[in-house]
Image: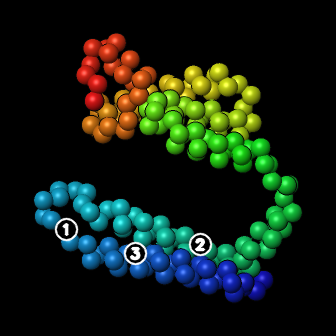
Amino acid sequence: MRPDRADLWVGLFVLGLGVLAGWQATEIPASPLYAQVGPHAVPYAVAALLALLGTCLVGVALLGGWSRTLEAEANAPATNWRALLLMVASIKANLALIGWLGFSAAASAQFVLVAAAFGSRRPWRDAGLALMLTLFAWFGFVQLLGVNIGAGLLEEVILRLFGMDVP
């Protein structure tokens, strides 16, 4: 097989991004106060992953590329407009409800709508699971990390039940 030039350029570009990110990570000043994980850890990890991805893309491009496979999948089934509209509605519901009802209720509404977009036919089960997950996340952020992500009516009721102060 002969290499696909467009795919090869994409792979080289991603590899170049990895090299650039690695070089820029070396320029980050580090304080000697960091014992183990300093400000370089994540940039180095991102640079390494970009370089690995770029290398893999170059390898696949040299073996014939991946764009032809994508072109073959262009004949995929038609767009599922119901699912797309439910996903958009989930984002709008979260934005509309978070200031009014708080994080848990807004995120739960979003969860139920996304589950419906993926084909779930059990909204009550989805709502119960969503409430458990979002309340767990909310309490994790507020109580463990000290980050207030928006207490609503539900969170306030639960905090009062446990005799805790509402942030």
Q: Residue at x 61, y 80 (%)?
A: 10
**Residue 136 visible in rendering:** no
Name the residue rendered at 72%, 48% in the picture: 84
Residue 21 got which mark?
3
Along the line of sight, which residue is nearer the eye, 101 or 130?
101
For disc 2, the neighbor class at 10 Å (few under 14, some 14 to 19, many from 20) is some
Which of these two is toward me, 126 or 13? Answer: 126
Q: Residue at x 22, y 56 (%)?
A: 36
Assign a secondary structure to mark 3. helix
Please tell me which residue lies in front, 87 or 37: 87
Element type at marker 2? helix
Tell me if mark 3 has few (under 14), some (14-19) or many (20+) residues whose alpha carbon lies within 10 angstroms of its own: many
Residue under label 1, please give it: 30
- Name the quarter where the C terminus is drawn: top left
Residue 147 figure quarter: top left
Mark toward the start of the polypeptide (2 vs 3): 3
- The vertical placement of 18 against 82, above or below, is below
160 relative to 166, above or below: above
Q: Quadrant of residue 67?
A: bottom right
Report x, y in % for residue 113.
Answer: 65, 36
Tell me: 107 left or right of 67: left
Find disc 2 in the rendering and name its residue: 56
Cα distance between the residues tagged 1 and 3: 16 Å
Query: Which circle's residue, 1 or 3, is located before the other in the chain?
Result: 3
